[in-house]
Image (cartoon, grey):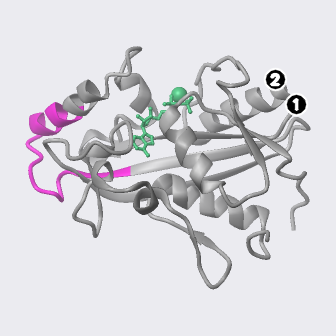
Amino acid sequence: MIELPPLGPRLVIATHNAGKLAEFRELLAAFPVELVSAGELGLAEPEETGTTYAENARIKAEAAAIASGLPALADDSGLAVEALWGAPGIFSARWAGPDKDFAGAMERVEEDLQDRGAVTPDQRRAAFVAALCLAWPSGEGLDVEGAVRGAIVWPPRGQLGFGYDPVFLPEGHHRTFGEMSSEEKHGVEWDWDGRATGLSHRARAFGELMAALFPEGPPR
Ligand SMILES: O=P(O)(O)OP(=O)(O)OP(=O)(O)OC[C@H]1O[C@@H](n2cnc3c(O)ncnc32)[C@H](O)[C@@H]1O
Ligand SMILES: [Mg+2]
């Protein structure tokens, strides 16, 4: 059993991405913690100098925990396309550029797939990956990861979600993340083991985090 400091009463969501923040607000809705975002606290965005999702999540969570004196939860995530050797991967946000042009970033993914002659769903396999880090000002931290497999579709489908959601079709589903309600994309359910489960990479990583924090099941 790991002994960890408490999660609340206030928890910083260490992201400047409004889409992620909305998902974390929903994922954490049942928990007795007050959520504040890095943006609301006016925290600077640290440079993501890591070479893995986990390293970048740790950089963001520790920076926010130290700056705020509160526990902080960060997410580093991305879309890994198999035929593109895992690109855009940890560079998923950077492919959209400073103007956050995700229509352009999705086009770049499609052009690169076309260049490789990837046309069948099998040749267009991809995964969304999320690493979460929960860091406390004391220096303690907890790292987890989640992923969901799927395929890239073209043209983009749906207006929901954010980022690359409209081109990602999760395995076993017929609608893209851009066509799914938030409950369907990242809603978490508790299974009979008291373990959180979900569809999206973020929901799955969150389930791992909850299992690590609350091995006896969700707090009531
Ligand atoms: O670093 P923070 O402030 O959290 O915000 P960010 O947008 O820069 O986030 P990342 O550095 O983790 O970059 C991940 C990018 O991958 C994309 N991405 C991650 N999760 C996604 C999801 O659930 N749906 C669609 N796109 C996603 C999205 O475009 C993100 O900008
Ligand atoms: Mg970022």
Q: Look at the numbered disc 2 and give the secondary structure of its residue.
A: helix
Q: Would you say 116 lies left or right of 183 here?
A: left
Q: Position of residue 188 (x, y in %)?
A: 55, 65
Asked whether mark 1 and ligand 1 are closer than 8 Å, the reply comes as no
The residue lying at 91 percent from left, 38 percent from top is 138
Tell me the distance, in whole angstroms, between the alpha carbons under discs 2 and 1: 6 Å
Would you identify the image quadrant in which residue 205 lies?
bottom right
Does the image show residue 66? Answer: yes
Which amino acid does the dot numbered 2 rest on? Ala
Would you identify the image quadrant in which residue 133 lies?
top right
Please give the range of residues in magenta: 109-127
Query: Which circle marks residue 4 in the picture?
Result: none
Q: Position of residue 146 (x, y in %)?
A: 53, 56
Query: Which circle marks residue 67 in the picture?
Result: 2
The residue lying at 38 percent from left, 39 percent from top is 162
Mark 2 near mark 1, Cβ–Cβ under 8 Å?
yes
Residue wearing tag 1? 69
* Position of the N terminus by quadrant: bottom right
Q: Would you say 117 lies left or right of 168 here?
A: left
Q: Up-down: is 13 above or below 210?
A: above
Q: Position of residue 174 (x, y in %)?
A: 22, 64
Query: Callout 1: 10 Å neighbours few (<14), some, many (20+)?
Result: some
Using the image as rendered, state which of residue 1 and residue 185 is in the foreground.
185
